[in-house]
Structures are given as C-alpha cells and as structure tokens.
C-alpha cells in the first residue's frame, strides 16, 4: 500500500480540534511514511531563551537570544530546523534542513550564523493515525516555505489557515484571484 507523503508540508489544526496539545497549531512534517509521521509545532515558543537553558546541553557558552520551542507532546531529543545544508541530516524542503544530532545543534547555536529554531519534544503519529485524523477533519495541509518556519508572527495559525482556506476556495470555484479584503470584491 502506497501513501502520498506529506513530508515537507504544514499540518494546520482545524478550528474544531480541541486537543490542548494541538489546538491552533501549525506543524512542519519532517517525515511521513507508512510507519507513521514526525513533525514539529512551529508556533509554540516557550518563554525560555536558548542561552538560559544551554548549560543543560553543553558546557560551552551560548549567547543566542532565540526562544526555545515546544515541538509537541512527545518527549525526545533536542531537535533543530535550520538553513545550513552542511549541518543537515535531512532536507525537509529546499533550503530547510533538520537535525537531532547534538554536535550539529551545538555548532548551529554557537556559530549563530543563520536561521534556526530549536525544539524540545515532537509530534508523532503511528501508522495510519495521521491519515485517520485527516479523514476526520482534524487537519488541513499546505505547502511549507522557509518563511513559514522562521517567521516570528504570533498569529501564524491564522495566517496559514487563511492561506489554506483561500487555496481551497480558489480550487473548488476555479477562481484565479481573490482580493485580500473580500469586502473589496
């Protein structure tokens, strides 16, 4: 049985999804196979700065003012998404890479030379679980961009949900353009 992979796409929580772990989340899918899926919640920054928790990871000094993010409810290693090809273990989309390797994460943080986000925890689904949740209407999907991943917008869910809705309307009604403000139509 083949599945259409959703790797490199965003999962956008449906408004009716009430699970507190996923309410109003946008998740970047890093892996999606017959065995299941792995993703990171993009819009759950913690109040902790990386520099404030770095001593739990490394003895080397860290000056990063970036916030640590909660990737999901499943405990796991510290993970990073970033723009440094040479430090990536997997390419998620063009220009965006993933690594759970401590040495590579340390290099990203200490060199602080590019875009990256660090995550504690991740979001995971067993075989067929994500597909079932999608059939139930819990998730929408859209193509991920590097901008989606690194934007610091507090309203990422609203912005991406609007993109999903607009694409759906355009597709179903075969409309080529919708004005940003529908009152202008």
Image: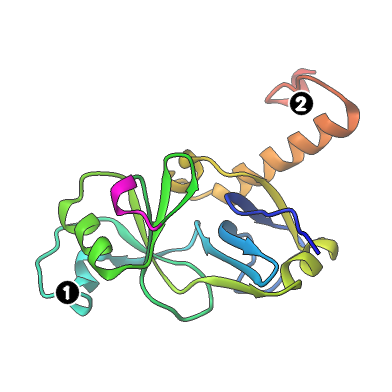
State which tag comes first along the sequence, 1 or 2: 1
Q: Residue furthest right?
A: 173
For this rendering, which residue is in front, 94 or 47? 94
Circle 2 residue: 182
Q: State which region is magenta.
A: 84-89
Residue 114 is left or right of residue 164, and the answer is left
Height in image: 11 above or below 74?
above
Q: Nearer the viewer, residue 18 or 68?
A: 68
Q: Is residue 143 above or below residue 117?
A: above
Q: CA distance from mark 1 to mark 2?
A: 51 Å
Residue closest to the eye, 155 or 53: 53
Q: Which mark is residue 162?
A: none
- For the C terminus, give its image quadrant: top right
Give the residue displayed 55% in from the left and 63% down from the top.
Answer: 39
Q: Is residue 80 magenta?
A: no
Q: Give coordinates of residue 102: x percent, y percent.
A: 27, 70
Q: Quadrant of the N terminus?
A: bottom right
Q: Secondary structure at mark 1?
A: loop
Left or right placement of residue 166 versus residue 107 in this view? right
> Residue 7, position in %: x, y?
60, 54
Residue pictured at 16% horizontal, 57% vertical: 110
Labelled disc at residue 58: 1
């Amino acid at each position: 049985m083949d599945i259409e992979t959703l790797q490199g796409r965003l999962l956008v929580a449906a408004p009716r999804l009430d699970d507190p772990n996923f309410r109003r989340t946008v998740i970047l899918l890093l892996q999606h196979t017959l065995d299941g899926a792995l993703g990171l919640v993009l819009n759950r920054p913690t109040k902790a700065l990386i520099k404030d928790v770095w001593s739990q990871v490394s003895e080397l000094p860290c000056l990063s003012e970036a916030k640590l993010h909660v990737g999901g409810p499943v405990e796991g290693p510290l993970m990073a998404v970033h723009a440094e090809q040479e430090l990536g273990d997997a390419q998620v989309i063009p220009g965006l890479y993933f690594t759970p390797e401590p040495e590579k994460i340390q290099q990203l943080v200490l060199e602080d030379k590019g875009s990256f986000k660090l995550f504690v925890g991740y979001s995971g689904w067993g075989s067929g679980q994500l597909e079932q949740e999608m059939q139930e209407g819990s998730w929408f999907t859209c193509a991920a961009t590097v901008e989606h991943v690194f934007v610091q917008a507090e309203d990422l869910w609203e912005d991406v949900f609007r993109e999903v809705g607009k694409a759906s309307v355009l597709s179903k009604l075969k409309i080529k353009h919708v004005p940003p403000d529908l009152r202008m139509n």
